[in-house]
Image (cartoon, rainbow, N blue to C red):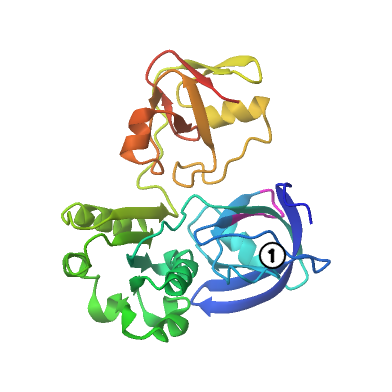
């Protein structure tokens, strides 16, 4: 199989209930060909029949090249993608899939603390498997509103006392000060889940200087998307096109008028799919994806939400 292509048409081979309002969906190549490899933290983008595209973390076995597996929470008040996938995902259905990308890779470390909330457990499961194989010290704190809403709970319980389940209706919220204070020096923290949980982990992490690093991935923006601000010019250097981005309009929309295939997904600045290299100008960063250091360097920007602090940006497009 040629692995330099961006997309494959894959067939749904199984759909099972993983928790309340959560289905597990597995895809395979229609001809049985092995699928391109992936590493923990990777996601695929599923192109839905309506034309919507949505990203989902891979949560299966990285050694299993026969299928890709995702788990999808049906969000009644979301933007429609999860509801559509719940309805469209039936055995035998074929969907276009963008091949795995990884904006949330697992760094090598001797010790990890994983903190997952709700459907945010999905990218952490392959990370735990890799940490186990590497012989690293690890622990998982997994929070959910109730036991029946926690996907893969039984599998994770089988790992024993390394896994600490925090069922909200029984125990409330995780005791982050105690959990992080008790982690060995140099421990790397990975967290994924609801925005308030990630914010709480990040705030508590800053109080523990003995920890080795914090990595997180959001499934939603930390606040309302703000595209306010004066108009400015954007030059697409490789394309040779310059245009004006009006007040209240995002750069991505204008770029896609020129480059319809420009990658994007969340349109809220948290997924990293529209990351674009900045050649000239000063971005006004409004994303939840880049670290403060990355925003300060301004080598790249998220064009779905960020704007320009000056009169012009030159992008490597």
User: Where does the image place residue 170, in percent across and percent down from the top left?
Assistant: 26, 82
Total numbered labels? 1
Q: Quadrant of residue 186?
A: bottom left
Give the percent coordinates (x, y) of residue 178. Answer: 16, 69
* 154 w.r.t. 280: above or below: below
Left of 88 or right of it: where is 108? left
Give the residue drawn at x 27%, y 55%: 212
Residue 115 pos. (x, y %)? 33, 66
User: Nearest the camera: 169 or 308?
Assistant: 308
Q: Is residue 10 magenta?
A: no
- Height in image: 101 above or below 84? above
The magenta span reads 44-51
Return the residue found at the far right.
31
Instruction: Label 1, secondary structure: give it.
Output: helix
Residue at left offset 50%, top offset 32%: 303
Residue 193 appears in the rendering: no
Q: Nearer the viewer, residue 105 or 239?
A: 105
The quarter of the rendered structure image containing the C terminus is top right
Q: Nearer the viewer, residue 69 or 23?
A: 69
Q: Nearer the viewer, residue 87 or 33?
A: 33
- Residue 253 appears left or right of 305: right
300 over 19 or under it: above or below? above
The quarter in which the N terminus is drawn is bottom right
């Amino acid at each position: 199989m040629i692995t330099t292509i961006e997309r494959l048409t894959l067939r749904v081979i199984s759909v099972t209930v993983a928790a309340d309002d959560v289905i597990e969906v597995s895809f395979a190549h229609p001809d049985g060909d092995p699928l391109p490899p992936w590493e923990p933290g990777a996601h695929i983008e599923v192109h839905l029949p309506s034309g919507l595209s949505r990203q989902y973390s891979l949560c299966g076995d990285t050694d299993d090249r026969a299928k890709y597996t995702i788990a999808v929470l049906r969000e009644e008040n979301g933007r429609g993608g999860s509801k559509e996938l719940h309805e469209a995902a039936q055995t035998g259905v074929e969907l276009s899939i963008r091949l795995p990308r990884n904006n949330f890779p697992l760094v090598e470390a001797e010790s990890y603390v994983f903190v997952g909330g709700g459907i945010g457990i999905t990218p952490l499961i392959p990370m735990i498997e890799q940490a186990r194989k590497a012989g690293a010290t690890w622990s998982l704190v997994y929070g959910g509103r109730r036991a029946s809403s926690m996907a893969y709970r039984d599998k994770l319980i089988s790992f024993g006392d390394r896994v600490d389940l925090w069922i909200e209706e029984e125990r409330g919220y995780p005791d982050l000060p105690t959990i992080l204070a008790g982690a060995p020096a140099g421990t790397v923290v990975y967290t994924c889940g609801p925005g308030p949980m990630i914010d709480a982990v990040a705030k508590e992490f800053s109080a523990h200087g003995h920890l080795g690093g914090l990595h997180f991935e959001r499934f939603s923006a930390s606040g309302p998307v703000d595209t306010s601000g004066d108009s400015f010019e954007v030059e697409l250097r490789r394309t040779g096109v310059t245009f004006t981005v009006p007040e209240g309009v995002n750069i991505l929309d204008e770029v896609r008028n020129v480059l319809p295939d420009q990658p994007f997904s969340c349109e809220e600045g948290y997924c990293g799919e529209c990351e674009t290299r900045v050649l000239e100008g000063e971005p006004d960063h409004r994303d939840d994806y880049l670290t403060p250091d990355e925003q300060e360097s301004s080598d790249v920007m998220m064009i779905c939400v960020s704007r320009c602090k000056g009169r012009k940006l030159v992008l490597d497009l």
